[in-house]
Structures are given as structure tokens and as C-alpha cells.
Image (spheres, rainbow, N blue to C red):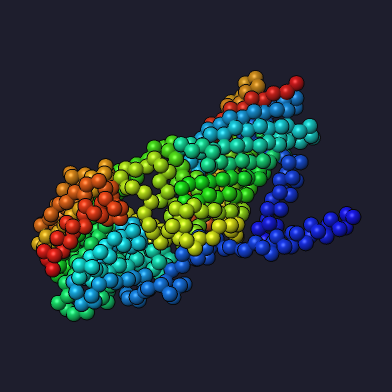
Amino acid sequence: MSLKIIKKVSIFCILLSACTKERKINDSGFLVPKTVVEDLSLPSITVNGAKFHAEAFGPADSAIILVLHGGPASDYRYLYNCKEFANQGYRVVFYDQRGTGLSQRFPKSHYKSVQQLTDDVNAIIAFYRKVPTQKVFLLGHSWGGILASAYINRHPATVNGAVIAEPGGLKWKDVKDYIDASRKMKFTSEALNNATYLDQFLTGKENEHEILDYKYSMLSSTGDESNVVGNEGVLPQWRPGIVLQNAYFDIAERENPDWTDRFLRSFTTKVLFVYSERNTAYGLAYAQKVSAAFPNVQLFKTLGAGHDMLSFPTGWNNTYPVMLSYFNSLK
Amino acid sequence: MKKSKILLLVIGLMVFKNYATAQNVNWASLEKKQQHILNINAGLDYGLTYGVGYGHQLKSKLPIIINGEYSFPSGNKIVDDFKTKIGGSIRYAKVNNFLFTAKVYGVFRRYQNTLSRLVNFGSDMSVAAGYYKKKWHVAGEVGFDKAIVTHFKHSQLYKNNFPGVQDGWYEPSTGGNFYYGIQTGISFKQHDIYLKAGRMLTQDFTTTPLVPFYLQLGYNLRMGK
């Protein structure tokens, strides 16, 4: 009798373990999506020594709007609304910046300077520009606004206009002050503990991208309490790239960059500078301070929206006509 | 593989409960007759946390306490995150007033936010050495908190971003943090008030958790006839 029971239990255990699928914490495709290196079906281009997740919409030879996402540990998915410019005859180009989104990953030691990212912008423009007379506009949001400004600071002649939406600052100290203000959380809040409590469940080594990217994606859970930047919900995204972000934070701390120090102040083309009504860490005074680096600025306040004003319906509907009018004026 | 780890952990806990355990006690003031130890504490343990515990001193040659602890982080959702520990501590050596102790816990913890829910089985082991008098003590400790096996379950919000995410048990071990610090306290009658604090490092020794230190202020009530 007891032998039968042991046999039955043994068979049950064997069947149970056979049903269990083993999942590796440090493999792509389980907790975070695969990148363009692992999933060859994803749209990609290879320029400047890296494989980028990239897409373009609209006529190939019309004026380019190059969309630069924030983060830098974010991706372009949350800016997909900008595809609408393709319906107006623009060539809209999206790409996930080096080391983030679904673009190729690199070890932290790979990142040497912020110039690497402006070089990438140059290479992306060169890839999509079919004729030398094809106009190029930049549309940068948050960190993407800093990157657009940094690019204009180095290559003003390449750019025919830019929409800069709520960059944290164009000097590193301003960026740090903005980060502190925008991420202010109560010490006892659910949001802060949601961010810190996870550290006992998951610890990734310096270059374990899958674990670190997954952990960072958990920070987009708001915890119901932290809404300084005024967003309406969780942003759509593919996958963050936290190794890149950590690397650039370290580089910026070391180099203390000023992205206005070369040719930015001589860029006389009008720039559309967008800020939002609900981001209490920004506001008119800060928008004026940051945008003062451009000699010719049109300030625009997006009503009814927070920092990610280009992603949620109210913000997009209020900002899109102004951006379209701006691009059309320079087309 | 995952099941065998869980089984090993369960067996480990069953073994440990026969030998050891618990809160931060002043071993010099703990009397043999004081079999029950109630504990409340608050501090920083991967966030601002509050905890309670119960310890039971065994009638053994070496002082041994088995105990259980429950703690949770602050926030507006009290029950979504917590940590429980079951295990024991033993005072295994004594040289005059210098005492040497060890703690071994099995850990079961839960984490939930709007994107995912994690359930983890782990272990927490530490050793301490210090100077213990009846009315006060000070000691240094070093330990390792290991997340051995973790189950992931994701919300629709996360699946909207990544429909291909796979829920289930993940391996190999998903994390671990070293910690080292000091513990000190005062004791009077049946009471201990203690403070422990220290630094934390992830298991690769190159990075730290977002809260890179721990701190606990606690109170013990020792009872028994």
C-alpha cells in the first residue's frame, strides 16, 4: 500500500517538474524584450559602429523630422504620436538611442563621452538624407531636447529648425537641479518604497542588461503618489537601457558639460520651445531660463498636460497644431 | 531545478529551527527563564520599514533563540510588500564578556507595484562579535541576504508594454546583498532598546542598493518565569 503511494507521489512530482518551464533571469525575451541583435525581425540600421532600432515614415525625399526620445534610458515608443507628421508630407525618423530601447547593448566601459551620441545623430541624419538639399528638423523631448541642443551646438549648419520640449537644462548643473525637483518624493511614500524595496529581490551586475533594464522599468510604476511632473499615466515603452544612463551620468558628473558653449548662441533659426502646464518642477520661469540659450525662441505652454505632453491625448492635441505650423513655416 | 531549491530551503529552515535564531538581543542580560521575547522595530531595510517579531529561547546548553519576524515598508498600500523571516540565533562562543553569535534565517518576501508582483524565497545569514554587559552591549556584524528563487507575475499594464513577458519562477538566484555594521543597546529589567546600523553592498561588490545602508531601532520585552 505504502509503496503504491510512494510510486504515485513520485510520478506526480516527475510530471509536475516536467511541466515547469525554466526561465533564465539574465536572458532577453523573458522579462524584457529582445533587442535588434537578438531579434532580426525588428527594423534596424547599422551606423557609427552600432545597430540601432529605427523606423522612418513618409516620403523618403521630403523634409526630415528626426525624433529624439528622452531618458536617455528610454525609447521612441512613447513618441509614436509624431508619426502624424508623415501624413503631412514629412519624413519622420525614429530611433532608439545607442544602448537603450531595442537598440544594441554595450558594456558600461564602451561609453566614453556624450559626443558619442551627437555623432550618432549625425550618422542617423546621413543615413536617411537622400539629397543634400533635404531639410532636417529635430524634435527632442526631455533628454532628447538636450541631445538636440547639443547637436545644434556642434552642427548648427545641418539643422533647419528644432522643437525642444522640456529639456532638464542645457548645463549639467541645471539638469541635476531639475532631476532633484522633478523626482521629489515623500520619504514614507509608496512610490519611493516601490523603487527601493525591489533591491532585495533583484541585483544585477554592472553589465547584466536584462536584469538592470527590467529593474529600471519597474520605476515607471508611479505608486499613486508621485506626480510632480503631471503625467496622466504610465508611458508606453519597449525597454529602458540603464547601463547607458548610468554611464552618461558618470561622464556628465566628470565632464560637467555645457551644451551651449560652442555654436548654439549663433543658431539664429527660430526654435519652438515647449513646456507643460502641469509639470510643477518646470514652469514659465524655468522655461525662460533654459531657452535663453537660443537667440530666437518661440515659447509655447501646453495646457492640460504634464512633462510627457507629446504622449497623452490632451497634450498631443494641444501641441501638435503648433508644432506643425512651426515646421510648415520653415519647410 | 526551482522545486529542488525550494525543497532545500524548506529542509534548511526545518534544520535551522532546531538549532538557532532572532532579533537583536543582549545575550548578557538574557536569563535562562526568559523564554519569550517580543520585539517591535522600525528602520531602514531597503526602504522605511516597520516590524514585529517573536523569539523563543530553547532550554539548551548553548543559548539558542528561535524566532519569526514580519516587516513591511511604509506607503499607502500596507499589505502589498512584506518580508517574513523564520530562523534562529545562537551564542556559540564566549570569552569573558566577549560573545560570538550567528543568525540564520529563511526569508519569504513579497513585492508588488502597478506593473508586477514578485514572491521570493531567500536566506539571511550573519555573524556578530562584541562586548556584552548586563546593562549594555556593542557588537559588529556582517551578513549576506540572498534572494534564492523568485516568482514573477505581471499586470496587464506591464503586458501592454511587453505582451511576451513570461510569468513564473526564475533562476539562477536573482539577487543578493552583503551588509556590515554595528549594533548596540541598553538593557534594564525585562527590556532591551537597541540600535543597529551599517552599509550594504550588492553581491558583485561594485554597486549598492538604492538605499545603501540599513538602520533599525528596536525594543525587546523578555518574559518568562
Residue at the right extreme of this rendering: A1
Q: Is residue B134 left or right of residue B43?
A: right
Q: How many marks?
A: 0
Question: Is residue B62 depicted above or below B212 in this figure?
Answer: above
Q: Quadrant of the N terminus of chain A?
A: bottom right
Q: Splitting the image into 4 quarters, where does residue A25 fall?
A: bottom right
In this picture, residue B129 sits left or right of residue A45: right
Residue occupying the point 71% across, 53% down: B7
Furthest-bottom residue in view? A131
In which quarter of the view is residue B169 placed?
A: bottom right
Please state if B95 lies on the left or on the right of A128 as rendered.
right
In the depicted view, which residue is nearer to us: B139 or A258?
A: A258
- Which residue appears at 21% of the width and 49% of the height? A302
| A289 displayed left or right of A253 | left
Q: Name the residue rendered at 51%, 37% in the picture.
A: B78
Q: x, y percentage for residue B142?
A: 59, 44
Is residue A208 visible to us here? Answer: no
Percent across and percent down for residue A231 are 32, 47
Of B13 and B163, nearer the camera is B163
In the displayed structure, would residue A239 be above or below residue A62? above
Residue B115 visible in the shown view: yes
A121 w.r.t. A253: above or below: below
What residue do we see at 32% from left, 42% from top? A228
Name the image quarter holding the C terminus of chain A: bottom left
Report x, y in % for residue A155. Answer: 18, 68
Position of residue A221 measured from the top left corner of the image (x, y, whole percent) = 42, 48
Q: Is residue B217 above or below residue A45?
A: above
